[in-house]
Amino acid sequence: MKKTILILLYVISIQYCYACKSINNLSVEEMLIEADSIVVATVLGFKTTNNISNVLFETDKLVHGDYAKQYLLFKGEKVNTTLQNKSEVPYTEGRRRLPGNCTSEDYEIGVSYLLILKNGTPYWSPFNPVNEKLIGEFDPWLMWIEGFFSGRQFQSEAKNIKAKGSAPIKENNKKISK
């Protein structure tokens, strides 16, 4: 009986460890091309409904794609301080997250984040840098992504990804009007 319970716990723990593992581990370049839109947005506040905390963002800038909404609302936890991603750009992994989470879901009021969205949420590409805290308009991650979409690198990567059967790519670097 003890052996059966131990085996069952072992199987459950393995499944828990791989719960976030995606079928297609996307490279940073693939993630950017697969995204619907990339925006810079600032946290305005939080709202809890049915014990689920949601974060409200105001969209400040459209970096890529065709996202036209001024506000975003999705699951997120309020914290006093979020950590900056300390890796070199291009980031290959998202900022620090709570154990068990596939993506960091913590945000602080008044801080801007670079949100890489698909179907209106940044929580679509596990472990990738889909919701990074920015340190101003000259943030290295923001500048790298803007350079990616404006340079030759984007054209080359887009052709490679399109050849694999991905959706067509739209490019639009306009500011969101308020």
Image (tube, helix red, strand yellow):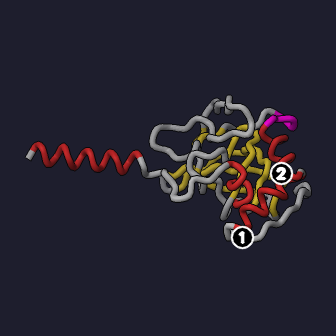
Type of residue at label 1?
A: Ala
Judging by the rendered image, the residue that carries numbered circle 2 is 153
Nearer to us in this view, 100 or 4: 4
Residue found 68% across the figure and 29% down from its top? 86
Name the residue at 64% across, 33% down: 82
Q: CA distance from mark 1 to mark 2?
A: 18 Å
Describe residue 100's horizontal placement relative to residue 104 as left or right: left
Q: Which residues are magenta?
A: 136-140
Which is in the foreground here, disc 1 or disc 2? 2
Disc 1 target residue: 167
Image x and y of residue 114, in percent:
75, 45
Amino acid under label 2?
A: Gln
Q: Label 2: state its secondary structure.
A: helix
103 and 22: which is toward the camera? 22
The residue lying at 67 percent from left, 61 percent from top is 118
Element carrying mark 1: loop
Residue 8 point in image, percent of width and height: 22, 49
Dominant SS of magenta comes to loop
Does residue 39 appear to the left or right of 17 in the view shown?
right
In the image, residue 161 lies at what x, y percent? Answer: 72, 62
